[in-house]
Image (tube, rainbow, N blue to C red):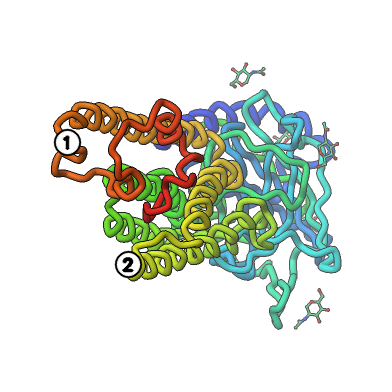
Amino acid sequence: MWNFNVRQLVLASFTVLSFISSSQAQTTNDESSNTTAASIFVSPQQDLAFGLNIPNDSETDFLFSLMMPVQSSWVAIGLGSNQMAGALILMAYPSSSGLNVTLSPRFGYGHTEPTPVSSDSGISVKSLAGTGLLNGTTYVFNGRCSHCRSWSTKGSKTNTTLDVNSREAPMLYAAGPTGQFRSDSLSASVKIHWNYGTFSMDLVRATGPGGVPVMPSTKDTAQSQGAVVRAAKEDKRDTTAIAHAVIMVISFVGLYPFGVLVLRLGGWVRWHAANQGLALVLVIIGSSLGFKISGTYLRTKNFNTAHQVIGILIFIFIFVQFTLGFLHHRTFKKTQQTTKLAPVHVWLGRLIILMGVINGFIGFPLALSPDYNYVLAGLVLFIFPGFALIIVTKNLIQKYWKKSKEGSGDPAGGYNMEPWKQTQAPNPTYAGPDQQSRDIGRPADLGAQQNAREYV
Ligand code: HEM
Ligand SMILES: *[C@@H]1O[C@H](CO)[C@@H](O)[C@H](O)[C@H]1NC(C)=O
Ligand SMILES: *[C@@H]1O[C@H](CO)[C@@H](O)[C@H](O)[C@H]1NC(C)=O
Ligand SMILES: *[C@@H]1O[C@H](CO)[C@@H](O)[C@H](O)[C@H]1NC(C)=O
Ligand SMILES: *[C@@H]1O[C@H](CO)[C@@H](O)[C@H](O)[C@H]1NC(C)=O
Ligand SMILES: *[C@@H]1O[C@H](CO)[C@@H](O)[C@H](O)[C@H]1NC(C)=O
C-alpha cells in the first residue's frame, strides 16, 4: 500500500516539475533570473526539491525554493548539520485552505519533532512571489530566510554557521507520508518522516547575485545540481507507536475481556488471575512505549492530551485492580466468603476495559491515523458481542441441564459448573424467570444470590 503511494509521489513530482518551468518563468522577472546563483537538491524519491541561493549582498540571509507534491503531508530541509540535532529546519505543509503553503522554521533537538524557533532567535521567513499551489499538483514555497546563516539552538553553547566557503555543507531532507495534512499553524505537529536522509550542498555555487533559485523544469532535468546525497532512508514508520497500539488493543479488546470470559464460563479463578497478570505485564510494556512516544511529538510532549491523561489513570487503575483481585482471593481462600473488595474489583475491572477501549478511539486520531478507528470499531463489535453470546449460550445450556436433572435428583450432574449456586440454592428448584434473566444481565450479578460466589 505504501509502496504504491510512493510510486504515486514520484509520478506526481514528474508532472509537477514539468509544470514548474513555465510558472517559474513568469516569476523570474522580479525575483530570479537565469543568472541567479543556486544549488539544487532533488530527493532520491523525487518527493521534494530544494533550491538555495546565498545572495552575495547579505551576510545573514538566504533565498530558497521548496517544492512538494500535493500527495505529501509535509516536507522539510535541515541546514548546517548531518543529523537532526542542531539543524535549522524549514518545514513546509499545505495551509488549511489547501491553496497555499505554511513554512515553519524550527530547530532540531534530536530524534524528535523539531521545535519552532523562538522569536528571540531573530529568524524569520518571508514568502516571495511564486508561493502557493501550482497546477493543482505541486506546492511551492519561495522565500527569504532572514538571520538564518548562524543560529544557536536552545541549550547549545555554540553557534552553527552556514559556511559559505564550503562545497560540502551538511544538510538534511525529510518527507512525511502521503495523506492529507493541512495547517496554518507554525507549530503544527506532524507524523514522522517516511523518506529522509542527508546530503551535502555546494554553497560556493549557491553564492552570487540574489534571487529565488530557478528550479528544474522537466523530468530529465529534475536532478540535483551542486548537491550530493549522503544517506537516504525509505519507508520509515514509527514502530514504537505501532507496537504501543497493537499491544494496547490486544490487551484491552482481547486479553482483559477474555479474562472475564473464563471466569464467567467456568469460574476458573487461577486462569483468570494468570490471564489478567499477563495483560498487566503487556499494558506495562505498552504504557512504557506510550511514555516514550510522548516525548517525540510536539502534540504530546506536554502530556496534556485526553489520551495521555486517561492513559495515566488506567495505568494506575490496573495496579489497584490487580492488588484488589489478589487480596480478595487471599481472604476468600481463608473464609470461603466473598469480601467487600469483590464489587470494587468487578466494577473497576469493567471501568478499566471501557476506558481502555475509549482511549484507543482517542489515540488513533492523536497519532494522526484516525482511519484505524474503523479497524478498532470492527474488533470491538466482533469481540464483545461474541463474548456476550458465548456467556448467554452457556447460561441457556446450563438452564436446560438444570431442568432435565431436577427429576433425577442430581442437580449438578456430578459436574458443578457454578459452585456458587449451591449454597445459595440448597433446594435446587428452578429459580423462576425473574432470577434467570437477572443471571444473564450483568448488573444483577452483584445481587444477594451471588454472596458465595467468589468473583462475579
Ligand atoms: C515528527 C517529526 C520528526 C520525528 C518524530 C523524527 C524522528 C526521527 C527519528 C526517530 C530518527 C531516527 C531514525 C532511524 O532510526 O533511522 C530520525 C532521523 C532523522 N531525521 Fe527525523 N524526525 C522528525 C522530523 C524530521 C525533520 C523535519 C527532518 C528534516 C529535515 C528530519 C531529518 C532526519 C534525518 C536526516 C535523520 C537521520 C539522521 C539522524 O539520525 O539525525 N527529521 N528522526
Ligand atoms: C499541469 O501540468 C501538466 C503537465 O505539464 C499539463 O499537461 C497540464 O495541462 C497542467 N494543468 C494545468 C491546469 O495547467
Ligand atoms: C538568460 O535569459 C535571457 C533572457 O531572459 C536570454 O536571452 C539568455 O540567453 C539566457 N541565458 C542563458 C545562459 O540561458
Ligand atoms: C555579486 O556577484 C555579482 C556577479 O558575480 C557581481 O556582479 C556583484 O558585484 C556582486 N555583488 C556584491 C555585493 O558583491
Ligand atoms: C500564501 O501565504 C503567504 C504567507 O505564507 C502569503 O504571504 C501569501 O499572500 C499567500 N498567498 C495567497 C495566494 O494567499
Ligand atoms: C552566536 O550568535 C549570536 C548572534 O546570533 C551572538 O550574539 C553570539 O555571541 C554568538 N555566540 C557565539 C558563541 O559565537
Disc assigned to residue 333: 2
Rendered view: 316 above or below 299: below
Which amino acid does the dot numbered 1 rest on? Answer: Gly
Q: Secondary structure at mark 2?
A: helix
Q: Which residue in the structure is indicated by mark 1? A: 409
Query: Viewer-proximal residue, 380 or 18?
Result: 380
Q: Quadrant of residue 134?
A: top right
Q: Amino acid at mark 2?
A: Lys
What residue do we see at 81% from left, 62% from top? 123
Left or right of 293: which side holds 333?
left
Measured as percent of width and height from the top left, residue 425 is found at: 33, 43
Residue positioned most to the bottom: 157
How many numbered marks, from 0 up? 2
Q: Going by the image, does 12 lie left or right of 409?
A: right
> Measured from the top left, where is residue 227 in percent x and y?
54, 54
Q: Is residue 110 above or below residue 314?
A: below
Give the quarter of the figure containing the N terminus. top left
In this orientation, which residue lies closer to the viewer: 284 or 35?
Answer: 284
The image shows residue 292, relative to residue 409, as above or below, that is below
Towards the viewer: 253 or 453: 453
Mark 1 to mark 2 CA distance (whole Å):
29 Å
Which of the two labelled residues, at mark 1 and mark 2, occupies the earlier sequence position? Answer: 2
Kindly indicate whether the residue at mark 2 contacts the one at mark 1 (C-beta within 8 angstroms). Answer: no
